[in-house]
Amino acid sequence: MNLRPAHRKLWLVLHIVSAGAWIGIDVLVAVLAGTGLLADDPGTRSLAYRALGTFVVCPMLSSGLVCLGTGVLLGLGTRWGLIRYWWVAVKLGINVLLCTLIIVLLRPGMPAVRAYGETMPPTAFDTSSLVMPPIVSLTLLSLATVLSVYKPWGRTRRGAAQVARQATARSAVRTP
C-alpha cells in the first residue's frame, strides 16, 4: 500500500499533532502532580488532584491511540514500513508500551487520586507515584521524536531481507 503524497501529508500532520498533544498532556500531568505535591494551599492541592484524577487519562490515551493509528498507517503506506527500519520499530514499541501503561497502571489509580482531592483527608495518601509517569512518558516521547529526526540504526533483518529480495527480482527481470 502506498499513500498518495497529499494523503501521506495529512496522516503525517495528524501524527505530529497527536504526538505534540500527548507531550503537552504529559507536561500538564507533571505540573498537576508537582502542584499537588508542593503547593502549600490545601485548596490548590485539592484542585490539582481532582483535575489529575478527572481529566488526564481520556485525552492522554486518545492522543496516544491516534498517534499509534496514524503511525501504523504511515508505516504501512510509506517506504519506511512498520518494522523495516529499527527507528520505526522502536517508535512503534514505545507507543504500544506507553498506551499499555496508561491503561494498566495509570487509569486504575485515577479514581483514588480524584477521591483524595475531593476529601483531602488528614491521613496520608502516597501521591509520590504520580511523579514517575510524566518523567517516563516525556523521556520516551522525546526519544521517539529524536528517532523521527535522526532515523538511526538502519534496516532491521526483515527490512534488509526485503531489499535483497527486491534486488534479486529486479535483476531477474533484466536478465534475458
Image (spheres, rainbow, N blue to C red):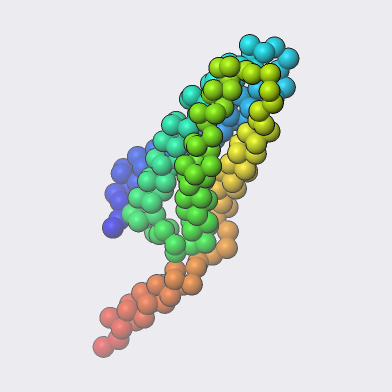
Quadrant containing the C terminus is: bottom left
Front-most of 111 and 52? 111
Quadrant containing the N terminus is: bottom left
Q: Is residue 142 above or below residue 34?
A: below
Q: Quadrant of residue 158?
A: bottom left
Of all residues shown, which one is farthest toward the bottom? Answer: 176
Residue at coordinates 50% horizontally, 54% vertically from top-left?
Answer: 93
Using the rendered image of the protein, determine whether residue 31 is visible from the camera's viewpoint: no
Residue 62 point in image, percent of width and height: 41, 36
Q: Quadrant of residue 49?
A: top right
Residue at coordinates 54% horizontally, 34% vertically from top-left?
Answer: 109
Report whether 119 appears left or right of 15: right
Front-most of 19 and 149? 19
Q: Is residue 68 above or below residue 170?
A: above
Residue 130 point in image, percent of width and height: 63, 33
Residue 166 point in image, percent of width and height: 36, 74
Residue at coordinates 59% horizontally, 22% vertically from top-left?
Answer: 116
Residue at coordinates 41% horizontally, 58% vertically from top-left?
Answer: 82
Using the rendered image of the protein, determine whether residue 94 is visible from the camera's viewpoint: yes
Report whether 79 appears left or right of 176: right
Front-most of 44 and 111? 111
Number of numbered discs present?
0
Residue 133 point in image, percent of width and height: 60, 39
